[in-house]
Image: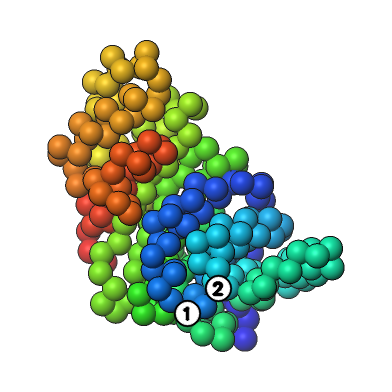
Amino acid sequence: MRPDGEITRGTTNPSRLRRVDRWIAQATAGALRAATRPLIVDLGYGASPVTTLELYRRVRAVAPDAEVTGLEIDPGRVASASRRLAELRAAGDDLPGLSFAVGGFELPLPRPPMLIRAFNVLRQYPEERAWAAWSRLRSGLADGGLLVEGTCDEIGRRAVWVALPAVPGGGEGLITFSARLASLERPSDLAERLPKTLIHRNVPGEPVHQFLLDFDRAWDRAAPYSPFGQRQRWLAAVTSLSATWPVMGHPPFGGHRRWRLGEVTLPWGALAPPAR
């Protein structure tokens, strides 16, 4: 059976996904440690397996028995990644639990994964196809599992991702905005990294447009903090924003520790388009 999906451009860079990996390793550490041999999927890792290797090392640091499978619909990319894995093992890097396989949204795996990371994959699809991919991936998760889907720029300075639970009955999702504050001019600069299901919704009358507008206004009001650095200005802006928006204010998804990293997380429902 042909894998479900389309071949991506495949471009990637080392550390490009460090922001979402950091979030996964810290915010979901408890759930990963509570599971036995949690399976994590890196879906559509591209022409190089470098970001899959980085994900593997980061999650194994908090969940030592975690297993990671990189899925690609291009057999040539899988063959190349498998050769690289064999080279690393031959050089003495054991990398237990890491593998690569041909597959797409159908998730051809021996068991349902606890977490799927799909980054810079759905951006090339029409919006309706992105919604359909979300549904299929969420239905393939293990109980208590999570789909983390989003977009970042070429070197990982700006990213937005949505974390959605397994269906049915998985609870509410989250949306996270993350930026390297030293290179950020305004919070709305993150709009170009919105997931496919939102990027065309950044227009007047839509919740995501109002949120970014309010975030920019809070940023402007926080200008007096600029002499103390971008981080202090960001913290002040997020504190102000949380008075009118349901910004997550407590661990593991929110609070000053995460805000200082240039992150802001809200319930997905706060910015989601009307029910589909």
**Position of 214 relative to 39 (above/below):** above
Say which quadrant the N terminus sits in: bottom right
Mark before the other along the chain sequence, 2 or 1: 1
| Residue 113 vs residue 121, the one in the foreground | 113
| Colour mapping | rainbow
At a point 42% along the width and 33% down the height, the residue shown is 189
- In the shown orientation, is residue 64 left or right of residue 257? right
Residue position marked by numbered label 1 in the rendering: 36
The answer to whether residue 241 is visible is yes
Residue 190 in the image, given as x and y percentages of width and height: 41, 38
Query: Does residue 262 appear to the left or right of 90 in the view shown?
Result: left
Where in the figure is residue 254, as x and y percent of width and height?
A: 30, 47
* In the depicted structure, whether residue 107 falls above or below residue 272: below
Is residue 118 in sight in this rendering?
no
Please tell me the numbered disc located at residue 65: 2
The reply to whether discs 2 and 1 touch (Cβ–Cβ < 8 Å) is yes
- Where residue 24 sits in the image (x, y, percent)? 45, 57
- Residue at (44, 69) in percent of width and height: 32
Instruction: Say left or right for 10 vs 86.
Output: left
Category of crowding for the residue at label 2, using alpha-carbon neighbours closer than 10 angstroms: few (below 14), some (14–19), many (at least 20):
some
Nearer-the-camera pick, 145 or 29: 29
Check disc 2 and report its element: helix, strand or loop: loop
Q: Quadrant of residue 3?
A: bottom right
Task: Please give the name of the residue rendered at 51% of the width and 54% of the height, measured from the top-left corner.
Answer: 21
Q: Quadrant of the C terminus?
A: bottom left
Q: Residue at x 80, y 65 (%)?
A: 92
Residue 261, by quadrant, is top left
Position of 243 relative to 19 (above/below): above
- Where disc 1 sits, the SS reads loop
Kindly indicate the quadrant of the structure image that contains residue 184. Answer: top left
Label 1 sits on what residue type? Answer: Thr
Q: Give the amino acid at mark 2.
A: Asp
